[in-house]
Image (cartoon, grey):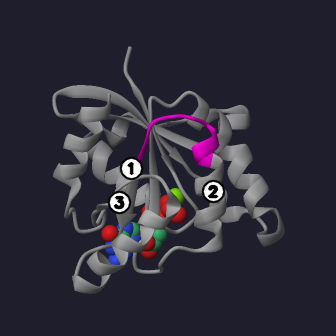
């Protein structure tokens, strides 16, 4: 059985960009799952010689502001519960927001292994602000740029170490 890796976090932090980066050419295998899981996108990624099921918790972007936390929870709850590893993503350029803190607190309560990803860290400004993510209590933030591919090899090592 393939281990399940779930990409979680508030909207616009770069989850889908990271998903596409990790799935790469195997994106052809991505299929929308019908029903209540329609907000999810799944693919198969090859991480250091091992195939993993990668789940992008998409669809949160359409949530109304007043129901954002509720939608986050609904859309991601079952995915996180079946996760062998959660990649919790933040936007290091935007800094840590109340939504990040709220979602991180919920993630911690699920007692699943979590890898904290500080995305958008290309350039010096982003790298410095990645340290801010320590405050989420999810361990050491791993700085990367999903869009530019920086830090993705390190991320793959970290994922492989935890599976
Ligand atoms: P999601 O809502 O979490 O799935 O985020 P998306 O993957 O849709 O990305 C949101 C925005 O952030 C898009 O405009 C991306 O191009 C941008 N983005 C994603 N990764 C990076 C990155 O590494 N650096 C920068 N500067 N922008 C990024
Ligand atoms: Mg997305």
The residue wearing badge 1 is 19
**Which quarter of the picture shows residue 76?**
top right
Q: Work out whether mark 1 precedes mark 2 in sequence or the reverse, and give the earlier one.
A: 1
Between residues 82 and 36, which one lies in front from this camera angle? 82
Counting the numbered discs, the total is: 3
Asked whether mark 1 lies closer than 8 Å to ligand 1, one says yes
Q: In this orientation, which residue lies closer to the viewer: 107 or 28?
A: 107
**Of label 3 and label 2, which has the lower sequence position?**
2
Instruction: Indicate whether residue 85 is drawn in magenta.
Output: no
Residue 141's disc number: 3
Identify the residue shown where x is 63% and y is 53%.
105
Residue 89 seen: yes
Q: Which of the 4 quarters of the picture holds residue 163? A: top left
| Left or right, 98 with reference to 154 | right
Residue at 29 percent across and 39 percent down: it is: 159
According to the picture, the residue beneath numbered tag 2 turns out to be 103
């Amino acid at each position: 059985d393939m281990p399940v890796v779930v990409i979680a976090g508030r909207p616009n932090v770069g989850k889908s960009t990271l998903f596409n980066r990790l799935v790469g050419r195997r994106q052809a295998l991505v299929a929308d799952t019908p029903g209540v899981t329609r907000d999810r996108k799944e693919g198969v990624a090859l991480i250091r010689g091992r195939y993993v099921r990668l789940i992008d918790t998409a669809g949160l972007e359409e949530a109304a502001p007043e129901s954002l936390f509720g939608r986050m929870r609904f859309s991601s709850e079952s995915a996180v519960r079946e996760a062998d590893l959660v990649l919790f993503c933040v936007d290091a350029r935007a800094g840590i927001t109340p939504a990040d803190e709220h979602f991180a607190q919920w993630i911690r309560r699920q007692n699943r292994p979590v890898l904290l990803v500080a995305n958008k860290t290309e350039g010096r400004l982003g790298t410095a602000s990645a340290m801010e993510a320590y405050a989420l209590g999810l361990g050491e933030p791993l700085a990367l740029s999903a869009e530019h591919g920086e830090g993705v090899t390190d991320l793959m090592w970290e994922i492989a170490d935890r599976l």
